[in-house]
Structures are given as C-alpha cells and as structure tokens.
Image (tube, grey):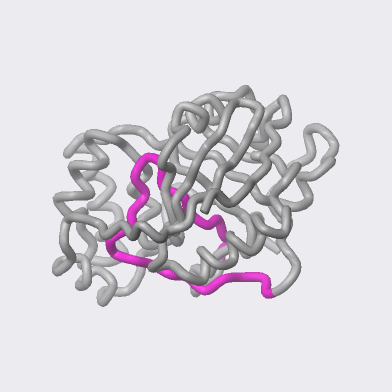
Amino acid sequence: MRKIAIVTLLLLSTVSMYAQRKTRKNKTHKSSAERLVEISTSYGNITVRLYDSTPLHRDNFIKLVQEGFYDSLLFHRVIDSFMIQGGDPTSKNAADSIMLGDGQAPGPERIPAEFNPNYFHKRGALAAARDDNPEKASSNCQFYIVQGKKFTDTTLNEVECRLRASNPAFYFTEEERNTYKTIGGTPHLDQNYTVFGEVVSGMDVVDKIAAAKRDGFDRPLQNIMMKMRLLN
C-alpha cells in the first residue's frame, strides 16, 4: 500500500467541477447544526466544525471519535507552513523514529471523494489524507489540518499556471485569492483532497504542533498525542 500523504502537486479534477465554481456564491453556508469535535493535545485544544455537505466524511469521523479510535494516536507528520497530519492507528505505542502513515481503520479502505467547490485549502481547513488512487478517494481515518502560508497574486498566478497545464479550466476565484493572500493556506491541494471541516478555535495550537522539531520522515521528535470528543 502506498504511503498516505499529502503531496505538493497533483492532477486536477474534471472540467465540470470547475464549471460549478463560476456560479457559486462567495459566502459559504454554515449550518448551526454542524457538529463540533474537540481535539486535545499536550500543546492545547483544537476545535473543528464538520461540514454537513460532506456527509460521508462527517459521519465516518464522528463514528471514529465516538468509538475512541483516535484516542492516544499521534500527529505523526508535521511540516511547518504546510499542515499537521494524524489518525494512523499504527502510531499508537509506535517505537520512536519509525516512519508512520500506512495504517487504516477497520472496514472499507477508502471513503469516496466529496469535493465541494465551496471548500478549499485555506488556513485551518480540515481534510482527509489519502494514498495515490485515480478516484482521489480518502483514507478511512487519516486527516490533516492546514497551517499553510500567505500567497501573493504573483505566487498564486504561478500555481494557477502550473495547474492549468493539466486542466485549462482551472482558476482561483476572487474569494479564494483574497483568502490565500490574507489568511493563507495550501492552494495546490484544492479539489484533490476532500475538505470536510475547519478549525473554529485553536489555530495557535496547530501552529505550535507544525513547528515541532521533526526527523527525516517529518515525524515529531517528541510524540504529540491526541484525544477527541464530540462537543455537540
């Protein structure tokens, strides 16, 4: 099985997906019923909101949280100015310096992709990691939180140009450009990994975890353990 990871450049989704982007409203709908999950770590707590419009990922994540699946697992891959990744069950009680990232939860190996043109990889986005598969289906347990960095119009144009080489229909919307310039994120991942939630509090904790000293596998030298609970 190939390593479940987030790479720096990928093929784009179909032209029809980007056609949807042209007609969307700038404001993302936020339902008051969306579920909140608290992720506790030794660095502090992170609270994430799960989107109702990605129900397969939402329900799978809630199920795993309720079962205690994530408790005592590690943030096993962290890259400053990029993201923090966790959810590999083999990270529980793993020996130091072992490369992690191949584990999965019991049940179906992957979750079908749920790309939504309203959701992109802004700072604080919660998304599903995955291995390399043509359907871009997600890992059934591993996730990442975007830390990212700020971009300029020049750097966004460079990313857009590279992605257009694979799909001429690709472009960043005005909303995405403004967000990537003022808040930051990882724009090269858009519509290639399913974004299914976002951080509502605790980005300072994400920053601390992302900045942790790490080995050649991007695993923190000191284990960063997690525990999760539903808040609503």
* Bounds of the magenta segment: 108-132
Which quarter of the rendered picture does the N terminus lie within?
Answer: bottom right
Q: State the image coordinates of residue 228 (x, y, percent, origin top left).
A: 64, 46
Q: State the image coordinates of residue 25 (x, y, percent, origin top left).
A: 16, 62
- Up the image or down, 37 lies above or below 213; here it is below
Q: Quadrant of residue 199?
A: top left
The structure residue drawn at horizontal position 40% and vertical position 53%, both measured from the top left corner, is 189
Asked if residue 102 lies left or right of residue 8, the reply is right
Is 109 colored magenta in this rendering?
yes
Q: State the image coordinates of residue 182 (x, y, percent, origin top left).
A: 23, 34
Is 121 colored magenta in this rendering?
yes
The structure residue drawn at horizontal position 76% and vertical position 45%, both measured from the top left corner, is 91
The structure residue drawn at horizontal position 52% and vertical position 29%, both measured from the top left corner, is 205
> What kind of secondary structure does the magenta stretch mostly adopt?
loop
- Up the image or down, 160 lies above or below 200; here it is below
Q: State the image coordinates of residue 76 (x, y, percent, origin top left).
A: 67, 40
Q: Nearer the viewer, residue 184 or 64?
A: 64
Asked if residue 77 lies left or right of residue 26, the reply is right
- Up the image or down, 222 lies above or below 189; here it is above
Asked if residue 78 lies left or right of residue 163, the reply is right
Counting the numbered discs, the total is 0
Asked if residue 71 lies left or right of residue 144, the reply is right
- Up the image or down, 160 lies above or below 219; here it is below
The structure residue drawn at horizontal position 67% and vertical position 39%, both measured from the top left corner, is 226
